[in-house]
Amino acid sequence: MSRPILICIVLVVLTAGAFGHDVSIRGRFTCGGAAVKNALVRLLDQDYLVDDILADGWTDENGEFELSGDGVDGWNGNPDVFIKLEYNYLNKMVVKDRTLRVRYETSEITNNFSGKSDIGTINVNNEHCRVYQLFREAILDYTLRSENDNLPYDYLTVHTDALLSLVSGTRKPWSNIDTIRVPGGYPLNATTARHELAHTLRHAMDGGRLHWWADISSYSYVQPHHCNMRSNPGFAFNEGWAIYWSGNCKCSEGSDMNVEGHVAARLCELARCKSDSQMWDILESNPGTIHSYAEFEEKLFSKYQPAC
């Protein structure tokens, strides 16, 4: 065999392996029958060490996706493909496990595949997908009512099956400035999701992580509580704000602004008089200076006349 012919054969083999085989996969993800919307999906080729990403995208409003790419195993073998859905909402919120890995679901692996395939609907029903659904809705609720498309941090992290609780002996969610921890088995609902999201938003607008730790000490944030509990102006405002935002406006009524339920009821009245967007604007415009109902009301009426 002449040398030019041998070189041509080698080039053909290398070229075939380099370009790979076309793959196109479509399907749908649901959580308890409801569409998993705006979640990250990846088309992957299973390998021994690290799976190759052939394509990625986002599920649509019906939970559907269609991804196309090309892959190769060995010199010219068809890839072993599967779909991975990550609980990542448009890079605004991610659901993670205790080791900080993003929670995910996968389809079955199709070995030695090329061409097009419709894998149909993959329905999952676990606490991770439910947490994703509820906090996605909570974020949408915030952006709509606050008229603000941006969160005051890079993205929200929600840990499911979390072990650590700031309040000893409790199995309830708790939040800091950009992270929410939900204990395993906790019956999360839309009200609690809005409540915990409101905590992260207020803490982030108030200041950085060091400021948050200082507030924990100053206002005794770490303690069990309920609507009618009398504490201090800082604690009552912090919890009252989250109660107001969650929509629980009638958990307690009165005029003592050291009681979180009373603060919540009054904040609900202010929001009806003004607007939710103006309420958030006051927090965002006054970092580090609002730690009581009185301070909030003074700033609100100073900017948005008349008083209610």
Image (spheres, grey):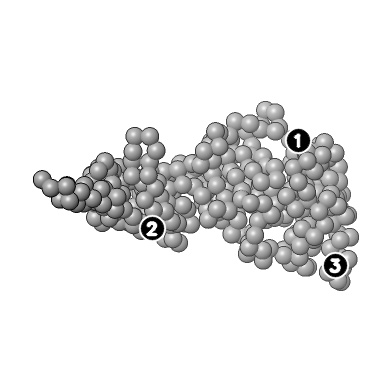
Which residue type does callout 1 highlight? Val
Which residue type does callout 3 highlight? Lys
The residue lying at 51 percent from left, 42 percent from top is 102
What residue is shown with label 2?
65
Going from the N terminus, do you reach mark 2 or mark 3 first? 2
User: Which circle, 1 or 3, is nearer the viewer?
Assistant: 3
The residues bearing labels 2 and 3 have C-alpha atoms spaced at a distance of: 46 Å
The x, y position of residue 135, in whole percent, is 57, 51
Which numbered disc covers residue 31? none
- Mark 3, secondary structure of its residue: helix
Q: Is residue 158 left or right of residue 307?
A: left
The residue lying at 74 percent from left, 60 percent from top is 280
Is label 2 in contact with label 3 (beta carbons under 8 Å)?
no
Crowding around mark 1 (Cα neighbors within 10 Å: few <14, some 14 to 19, many 20+) is some
The residue lying at 70 percent from left, 28 percent from top is 168
Whether residue 15 can be seen here: yes
Front residue (pair 220, 289): 289
Q: Quadrant of the C terminus?
A: bottom right
- Mark 1, secondary structure of its residue: loop
Res 271 → quadrant: bottom right
User: Which circle, 2 or 1, is nearer the viewer?
Assistant: 2
Front residue (pair 114, 170): 114
What residue is shown with label 1?
222
The residues bearing labels 1 and 3 have C-alpha atoms spaced at a distance of: 32 Å
The x, y position of residue 158, in whole percent, is 58, 43
The residues bearing labels 2 and 1 have C-alpha atoms spaced at a distance of: 43 Å
- Of all residues, the one furthest to the left in this rendering is 1
What residue is shown with label 3?
303
- Mark 2, secondary structure of its residue: strand
Res 187 → quadrant: top right
Which residue type does callout 2 highlight? Phe
The x, y position of residue 108, in whole percent, is 31, 43
